[in-house]
Image (tube, rainbow, N blue to C red):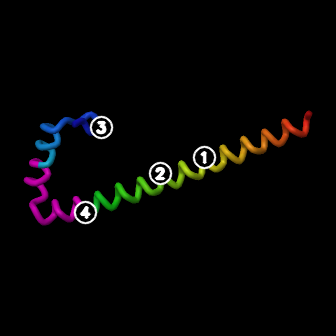
Amino acid sequence: MNIIGIGPFELLIIFLVAFLFLGPDKLSKFSKDFANYVRGFNKQKKELNDLIDLELDSNDNDLDDKDEHKR
């Protein structure tokens, strides 16, 4: 298991340090807020990818139409 170059041992150390600094209550709230942020980021990324794909498909269709008119 390797998440963005961080192995399981490093994740455990990060979690323990965060637990010591934040405490159980704040760590729980931070985790929920972070999960919401990641979900929102992924949603925006998907929407952007869909928009790019739509534009690329539209441009391909326009180029195909121009090629047919030249013939």
**Mark in front: 4 vs 1:** 1
Quick one: quadrant of the N terminus?
top left
Magenta-drawn stretch contains 7: no
Q: In the figure, residue 66 lies in which quadrant?
A: top right
Label 3 CA crowd tier, 10 Å (few <14, some 14–19, many 20+) = few
Q: Name the residue under label 1.
A: 53
Q: Is the C-beta separation of discs 4 and 1 under 8 Å?
A: no
Q: Which residue does the numbered mark 4 point to in the structure image?
A: 32
If you read the primary sequence from the N terminus, does the residue marked by circle 4 or circle 3 appear first? 3
Q: In which quarter of the image is residue 37?
A: bottom left
Q: Which of marks 4 and 1 is nearer the N terminus?
A: 4
Relative image position of residue 60 (x, y in whole percent): 72, 41
Q: Identity of the amino acid at label 2? A: Lys
CB atoms at circles 2 and 1 under 8 Å apart? no
Q: Do the residues labelled 2 and 4 touch (CB within 8 Å)?
A: no
Q: Residue under circle 2?
A: 45
Mark 3 secondary-structure assignment: loop
- Answer with mark 3 or mark 1, whichever residue precedes in sequence: 3
Is 70 situated left or right of 13 in this image?
right
Give the residues drawn in magenta, as a range: 16-32
Mark 3–mark 1 Cα distance, whole angstroms, equals 26 Å
State the CA–CA distance, disc 4 to disc 1: 32 Å
Q: Earlier in the sequence, mark 2 or mark 4?
A: 4
Tell me: residue 13, above or below residue 50. above
Q: Main secondary structure of the magenta part?
A: helix
Residue at horizontal 56%, vertical 51%?
50
Q: Which of marks 2 and 3 is nearer the N terminus?
A: 3
Residue designated by label 3: 4
Check the picture and name the quadrant holding the C terminus.
top right
Q: In this view, does 43 lie to the left or right of 49?
A: left
